[in-house]
Image (cartoon, rainbow, N blue to C red):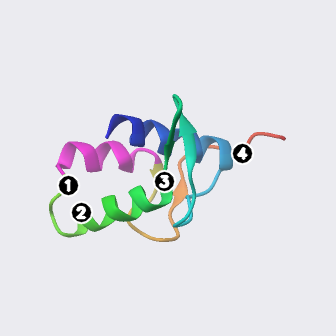
Amino acid sequence: MRSSLLALFVFLHREGCIPTARETIRVDGDTIKIGAWLTKTRTKHRSGRLPAEQAHLIATFFDGDWTDEGAAPAAVAPQAR
């Protein structure tokens, strides 16, 4: 879970948008399917299976409802390339 949370944070910061279903990111040498992970985590949250602590942590990464498909990253801007 930690590496996935780190990957989500890095993705949001770097890209400035939420990951699509097929997005991947490499963190510490591991490739994480961050889009699929976020979708599964939203589903767990909606069904009441995601611990409140984890849901609260993920919510801090977003402005508004993080379970909404159109959620925006909280106070991050994409870096110039």
Q: Reply above or below: 18 against 3.
A: below
In this view, the residue in front, 3 or 16, is 3
Residue 42 percent across, percent down from the top left: 33, 63
Of 12 and 2, nearer the camera is 2
- Crowdedness near tag 2: few (<14), some (14–19) or many (≥20) residues, C-alpha within 10 Å: some
Amino acid residing under circle 4: Pro
State yes or no: residue 25 in magenta: no
User: Can you say which quadrant of the picture contains the C terminus?
Assistant: top right
User: What residue sits right under mark 4 in the picture?
Assistant: 78
Q: From what the image shows, is residue 68 above or below residue 29? A: below
Residue 77 in picture, x, y percent from top left? 69, 44
Image coords of residue 73 (percent x, y)? 55, 52
Residue contact between numbered discs 1 and 2, judged by CB atoms under 8 Å = yes
First in residue order: circle 4 vs circle 2: 2
**Pointer 2 and pointer 3: residues touching (CB < 8 Å)?**
no
In percent of the image, x 51 and y 28: which residue is there?
28
User: In this rendering, is residue 14 above or below 46?
Assistant: above
Residue drawn at x 50%, y 63% as measured from the top left: 71
Q: CA distance from mark 4 to mark 1?
A: 29 Å
Q: Which of the marked residues, 2 or 3, is nearer the chain's N terminus?
A: 3
What segment carries the magenta color? 51-61
| Furthest-right residue in this view | 81
Q: Quadrant of residue 38?
A: bottom left
Pointer 3 residue:
33
**Callout 1 amino acid:** Leu
- Please state which amino acid type lies under the numbered disc 3: Lys
